[in-house]
Structures are given as C-alpha cells and as structure tokens.
Image (tube, rainbow, N blue to C red):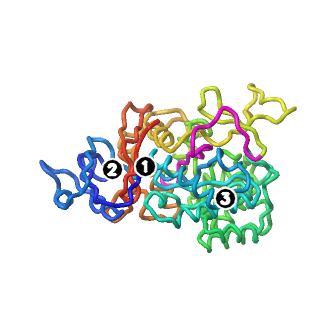
Amino acid sequence: MMGAEEHPVLIAEALTLETFPRRAAVVFREGRVSSVEAAVGPGLPPRAAAARAAGAVEVSGGGDWLLPGWIDLQANDLEWLPGGLRSPAEHAARIREVLRRQAARGVTGILLTTMAAPVDEVAAYLEGITLVRAGGGALYQALLGGLVEGTFMNPDLHGAHNPRHVRPLDRALIDRFIATGGLRAINIAPETSPDSIEVIRDLARRGILVGCGHARPSGLLVREAVEAGLAYVIHLGNGPTGSSLKGFCEGGLLEEALRNDRLAVTLILDGIHIDRRLARDIIARKEPERIAGISDAAFAGGSPPGEFEVFGVRGRASKDRRYLEVVPPPGKPPPDPRASDTGSLFGSAAGMREVFENTLSWLSVEMEGTWRRRHPALPFIEALRAASSICSANPARLLGEGDRGRLAAGSRADAILARISGEPGAYRVEVRSAWIGGMPAGGQTP
C-alpha cells in the first residue's frame, strides 16, 4: 500500500540493466532515483552506504531484477464505463481503485481509455481523471491522463465499439474534452474529415498526443498527418488497421506506419491480437525504439466476466479466458472457422506483466517470421533491454515524460523488482515489489 510519509529507500543486491552483470545498490530519495551503483566488492558502494547510515528503508533485491515500471498507453475499465452517466467524483473513486490494482501489478504509468460512448459520459470520465491527478499522492502520479479512442474513429472500422456513438470530427467537442483537463491523447481517423489535418496540427500545438487507429487513410494522407503532428498508430494491425497493397497513394495506414520512421506504433502484445511472428516482423521493421507495448486490457479494474455488454455491444471471454470476443448480434451467424475473418476482439485479457513477459520470450528465441523468413534469438540481456524499452522507456518518450521509463540518477523512482525464471521462449516474470515516486505500491503476480 502507498503511504503518506516518504522515507529514503535502499535496494541492495539487485540486478539492473545499467550495471549488469554486476549487482547494484539503488537509492530512492524524495521521489527520485538518487544513485545507481555497481557493487565492486564486499560492503555497499559509497552512496548506498551513506543512505544506510541516514536510516534508509532497506529492501533486499535478492539477485532479482530492478527495472523501470511499466507504462501502459491504453487500458480500459469496461466493468465500470458502461454504467451510465456518473459524476466526476464517482469516476475518481473508481479510478483510484483501478490505479491501486494496476500499481500492484507493476504499472507505474497509465492512460485510461474511453470507448465510443455518449459524449457526456466521456467528458465526465475525463473530469474524473482530472480530479484524481489533482489529488496528490505518489500513487495518483501514475495516472498520466485519458485517451479518447472511440469518439472520432472511422465508424466503418469500429471493431468492438458501437458505431452509433462515433461522432464526426468536431472542434467544439474536442475543445470540451480538452477543457476537462483529463485529455492526454486522442485518436483521429484522418480520412473522415477534410479538416482533419488542421485539427491534428492544432491538437499537437496544444500538447495533446495524437494517434491514428480504427482508420484507413491512404499512405499519402498519413504522411501529411505526420507533418501536422500525428505521433503514433494505435494498436497497429488491430482495430482494424487500413491497408492497401496496390500501387496507389503510397498504400494505406499499415504500409506507411511500417515505412515512416517518424511514426511510433503501439502493439497489443498478448499473443492473440497480433501473432507473435508478425510481432517480431513489426519490431524488426520499425526497430524496438519505435514500438510501445500496450495491454489494451478490457477490464483494468478486475477480472473479465464470462459474458458482458458494453454500450450495446455484447462480448464474452473465450473458454480458456485467454481472450475476449464480440458476440455476433441476433440473426448474424458466427464467424466461419474456415475463413480468415474470425470476428472482432474486445480488448485483451492480458496486463502489462504478460505484455512484458511475451516480449522478452519472443525476442529471446529464434522463430519463423511472416514477412521476414527468420528472426534470430537475441541474447537474454539484449532481449531484456528491448522488452524494457518497449514497455517502459518508449511509452514514456512518446508522452514526453523524459524522467519516466528509466532508472538513472535524477529520474522518477518508478520501479519494479521482478523475478525472471524459465528459459528462452518461455520466460516467467513475477512482480515482487513496485514503487511509484519512491513509495511502495505493493507487488503480486496473480
């Protein structure tokens, strides 16, 4: 649990990416990383010894890995959001519950996402986000804002969203969302309005992170949007992502996302939304520094029920509970198992621990690709560095949060102590402890 009073923290005998293969002693002080020192002999390094003498709270790393906390750029609370119009205070109380649950699982930064929903409900949720962020306390510093995903998507590519709640691009409505104080990122489908490029330009100038998903712009239009301030593609390959293999207009969103080095992409790395072989292909093509792993967790505040309904769209968990799928409406036949269209997925059933675990496992083993014939196995430490970048440093950089996503002197003390076991291709990651702003946030692996 997060406490109200902060004490310096000394974590000794931990492995870190900064000092590997030597173990390290790391000191947190006043919400920041004060020092990261490699152990060079018996006893503590100088700064760590000084922290001990000053009465720091000591935690034994036990040879486990002290890593930057994970940052999830897209998580949903579908247990709560469809409950009708609620007050910002009600939303704030629920969001605090979600943050506690996520922090205990190693998430030290998060964007909470809105679906295509009645606009009053979207605005009230964003106002709830603002209340939490204004409340102080280290735990609530993990809330980085809200992502409005569903409101301005292409309604023809709605996926698990209800297209009745998708709105035409509307500057006045965007201004209303910004005025709540909770909007940090927004999804824009550029092909849906002739004003989209200027809207993207204005949003970028106002410090809003602009993404593109559930869209099918031409590659040329994507390029124009990037010049205006489009920063990333939302869950590339899902949503769905528009694509064109023809020799016109530089293809579609998928093709330009892969080519354009100025675009980052987020990937739902649960092993379901994107096949692991395609994930390796995309990581190789974009290079790890342009990839941010996301959970797109549907039930960030709890476990998914067997069946559920969200804004008029029915969903259910698979029998093994590994994924969530949209239930076809009455009168519509289920997907044909012989066809490639297996229906829409309803967010993921994974969290950032699974995203990190999958990334580390997939990068550490040789495998066949889809667009690329073979991918080599990376040595463990290289795979771990890449997985940490994808789940921590890259999301932080995309948000402009330069003091998050890394463990270095002066950075925020957002960290996890993780035990990594298993073998290449099948690693297991257990969150032993977590800290946000140097304060303990629990730690458990369900």
Residue linked to disc 2? 17
What residue is drawn where x is 76% and y is 71%? Answer: 172
In front here: 41 or 245? 41
- Is the C-beta separation of discs 2 and 1 under 8 Å? yes
What residue is drawn where x is 70% and y is 60%? Answer: 188
| SS at circle 2 | loop
Residue 431's x, y, as percent? 40, 41
> How far, Cα to Cα, is label 3 from label 2?
34 Å
Q: Label 3 sits on what residue type?
A: Val
* Nearer-N-terminus badge (2/1): 2
* Nearer-N-terminus badge (3/2): 2
> How far, Cα to Cα, is label 1 from label 3?
26 Å
Residue linked to disc 3? 148
- For the view shown, which residue lies furthest in the left direction? 42
Relative horizontal placement of residue 135, taking residue 436 as reference (left or right): right
Q: Is 294 situated above or below 319?
A: below
| SS at circle 3 | strand
Point out the stretch of residues depicted in magenta: 289-311
- Occupied quadrant, residue 130: bottom right
Q: Is residue 265 visible?
A: no
- Is the C-beta separation of discs 1 and 3 under 8 Å? no
Q: Label 2 sits on what residue type?
A: Leu
Residue linked to disc 1? 388
Residue 16's x, y, as percent? 31, 49
> How far, Cα to Cα, is label 2 from label 1?
9 Å
What residue is drawn where x is 52% and y is 46%? Answer: 283
| SS at circle 1 | helix
Residue 376's x, y, as percent? 45, 37
In front here: 122 or 224? 122
Q: Label 1 sits on what residue type?
A: Ser
Question: Would you say residue 306 sits in the magenta stretch?
Answer: yes
